[in-house]
Image (cartoon, rainbow, N blue to C red):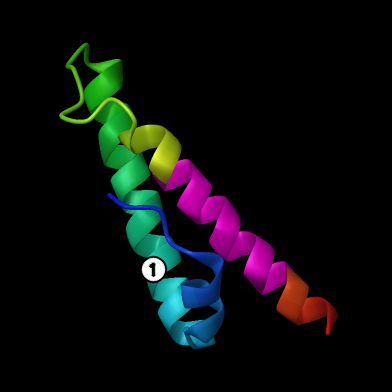
Amino acid sequence: MALLKTGDIREMSAEERNEKLKELRNDLMHERGISAMGGAPSNPGIIRAVRTNIARILTVQNEEEKV
């Protein structure tokens, strides 16, 4: 899971961002489920990366709503 760049997020349409947001939230739920069951995640930084990507998408959406 790579971090999404803000410029890439801004280039997405609103529908693409919503779809990506839904996908990221599902990934986060899956990774947290693995952690909760006591399993080790395949990549220890994946939860932080997913949360950061979600925050970036939400930030761009909020900025566009204000304009």
Front residue (pair 15, 56): 56
What is the magenta segment's predominant secondary structure? helix
**Residue 60 on the magenta segment:** yes
- Mark 1: few, some, or many residues within 10 Å (few <14, many ≥20)? some
Q: What residue is rendered at 44% in x and 35% in y?
A: 48
Q: Position of residue 59 (x, y in %)?
A: 67, 62
Residue 64 lies in quadrant: bottom right
Q: Residue 35's x, y, as percent?
A: 28, 20
Image quarter in which the C terminus is found: bottom right
Depicted 13 relative to depicted 42: above or below? below
User: In terms of image quadrants, where is residue 40?
Assistant: top left
* Residue found at the very far right of the displayed protein: 66
Q: Is residue 65 above or below residue 41?
A: below
What is the x, y in percent for residue 2?
Answer: 32, 52
Q: Position of residue 44 (x, y in %)?
A: 28, 25
Left or right placement of residue 51 versus residue 28 in this view: right
In magenta, the rendered stretch is 50-62
4 to the left or right of 61: left
- Using the image, determine if residue 53 lies above or below residue 61: above
Q: Which residue does the image show at 55% across and 67% down from the upper left?
A: 6
Q: Is residue 31 above or below residue 8?
A: above
Direction from residue 3 to residue 37 in the image, left or right: left
Residue lying furthest top in this view? Answer: 38
Residue flagged by tag 1: what amino acid is it?
Lys
Instruction: Tell whether position 64 is magenta.
Output: no
Dot 1 lies on which element?
Answer: helix
What residue is rendered at 22% in x and 16% in y? 37
Write the residue at 27% across / 49% down.
Answer: 1
Q: In the shown orientation, is residue 36 left or right of residue 61? A: left
Residue wearing tag 1: 20
Q: Which one is nearer the viewer's eye here, 43 or 65?
A: 43
